[in-house]
Image (cartoon, rainbow, N blue to C red):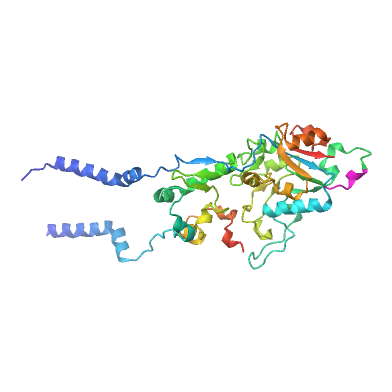
């Protein structure tokens, strides 16, 4: 009698503890969108940093770039992989948007999903949006 | 059968758990991404450099048309809003009309007695009364705005240009109070509805930041002269004030020049040939 009670209690307990997991399994959740590489970015294959590094550290990279451009007037960035980039979000062929042409699919899809709202675009302009 | 004590089992299980937990970090460490450590930052090869940038404006060569052209090209390329511009109601609904006191300007025409209040003599040379004097940021050697800025958003570059990091500006406007030349303007509102044609090569500003002339730092970095110099038909020259051989120093040697409010000790870098 006691044994059955304990086993049932344990089963309920384990199910309750694991509820986030099985809840996720039986419902469909939207997977995190991957940034889409289109056009030039797709052909190029080499970005400033490795893919994982870039995913984790692009905000601090941009921060470093901004200080370099504004404070030291250094505008060229030769990455460890030998490629040279213009340290700019949106101006010129060698800038971020110069290669990743579609801001909506490259920046916004992840930022919207993660509910982060960087204020880059309050001042910087997407050349595609200016007719 | 091998007998395992509870103690030894727990030990192994503990080590295994640490190993599993550390695997993402190990994977990251063993990936061959060198990060930013090996990267090299530098200037464009064509970039124009100087020890201290300065400007000479030849007032004899500046006519009304040239002055207007210079102001227009400067404001256009730097996305300076024009509050007389009619707002596109579809794109920016509910935009209030602008107050002329909120005007934003980087370079503009000024009358002699406002530009040079110290030099207003009783019997002033007649021509000075109607000549357009182009005034802008003086990129002072002892810039009071730089001293006033609490966030170091305004600072002096090594080459003498007084420039702003708009990202850091908190809009306190101490710099505007400090500048004796009125060279700074504040964005009381979002400037975008008032920009007729946005230049994609330069950012706009956001509401709540101060802005001013940056001596076309973005042009110098590309190896090109500032827009005002290009539009001035020879009336404006920029160059290195610390190089005795430079064009600008030759001009200064040959002509009598004045600077604005010199007695304040700000050491302006903009000289006027009169």
Q: Is residue B102 highlighted in magenta?
A: no
Residue appearing at x 92%, y 41% in the figure: B125
In this rendering, does residue B163 appear at all? Answer: yes
Residue appearing at x 22%, y 42% in the figure: B15
In this rendering, does residue B170 appear at all? Answer: no
Q: x, y percentage for residue B140?
A: 71, 36
In the rendered view, would you say B200 is above or below B50?
Answer: below
Q: Is residue B129 highlighted in magenta?
A: yes
Q: x, y percentage for residue B74?
A: 71, 51
Q: x, y percentage for residue B10?
A: 18, 42
Residue B266 lies in quadrant: top right
Q: Quick one: which residue is furthest to the right in this view?
A: B123
Q: x, y percentage for residue B159?
A: 65, 36
Q: Nearer the viewer, residue A94 or A56?
A: A94
Q: Quick one: which residue is furthest to the left in this view?
A: B1
In the rendered view, would you say A92 is above or below A27?
Answer: above
Q: Nearer the viewer, residue A72 or B156?
A: A72
Q: Nearer the viewer, residue B54 or A83?
A: A83
Tell me which segment is drawn in magenta. B126-132
Q: Give the side of residue B19 with respect to residue B95, left or right.
A: left
- Where, quadrant-wise, is the C terminus of chain B in this rendering? top right
How many numbered marks does the figure carry?
0
């Amino acid at each position: 009698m006691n044994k059955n009670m304990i086993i049932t209690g344990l089963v309920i307990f384990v199910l309750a503890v694991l509820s986030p997991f099985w809840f996720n399994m039986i419902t469909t959740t939207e997977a995190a969108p991957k940034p889409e590489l289109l056009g030039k970015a797709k052909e190029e294959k080499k970005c400033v940093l490795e893919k994982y590094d870039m995913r984790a550290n692009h905000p601090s990279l941009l921060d470093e770039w901004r200080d370099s451009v504004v404070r030291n007037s250094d505008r060229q960035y030769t990455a460890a992989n030998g490629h040279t980039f213009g340290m700019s979000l949106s101006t010129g062929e060698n800038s971020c948007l110069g290669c990743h042409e579609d801001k909506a699919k490259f920046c916004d899809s992840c930022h919207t999903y993660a509910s982060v709202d960087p204020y880059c675009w309050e001042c910087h302009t997407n050349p595609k949006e200016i007719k | 059968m091998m007998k395992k004590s509870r103690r030894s089992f727990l030990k192994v299980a503990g080590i295994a758990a640490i190993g599993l937990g550390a695997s993402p970090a190990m994977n990251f460490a063993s990936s061959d991404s060198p990060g930013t450590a090996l990267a090299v930052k530098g200037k464009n090869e064509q970039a124009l450099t100087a020890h201290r940038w300065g400007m000479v404006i030849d007032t004899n060569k500046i006519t009304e048309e040239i002055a207007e052209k210079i102001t227009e090209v400067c404001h256009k390329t730097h996305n300076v809003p024009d509050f007389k511009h009619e707002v596109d109601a579809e794109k920016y609904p509910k935009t209030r009309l602008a107050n002329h006191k909120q005007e934003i300007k980087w370079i503009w025409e000024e009358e002699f007695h406002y530009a040079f209040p110290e030099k207003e003599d009783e019997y002033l040379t007649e021509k000075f009364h109607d000549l357009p004097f182009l005034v802008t940021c003086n990129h002072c050697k002892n810039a009071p705005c730089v001293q006033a800025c609490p966030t170091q958003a305004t600072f002096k570059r090594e080459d003498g240009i007084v420039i702003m990091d708009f990202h850091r500006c908190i809009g306190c406007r101490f710099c505007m109070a400090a500048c004796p030349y009125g060279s700074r303007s504040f964005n009381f509102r979002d400037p975008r509805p008032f920009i007729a044609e946005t230049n994609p090569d330069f950012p706009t500003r956001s509401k709540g930041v101060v802005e001013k002339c940056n001596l076309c730092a973005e042009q110098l970095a590309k190896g090109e002269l500032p827009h005002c110099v290009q539009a001035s038909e020879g009336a404006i020259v920029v160059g290195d004030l610390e190089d005795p051989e430079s064009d600008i120093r030759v001009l200064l040697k040959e002509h009598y020049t004045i600077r604005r409010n010199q007695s304040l000790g700000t050491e302006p870098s903009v000289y006027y040939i009169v």
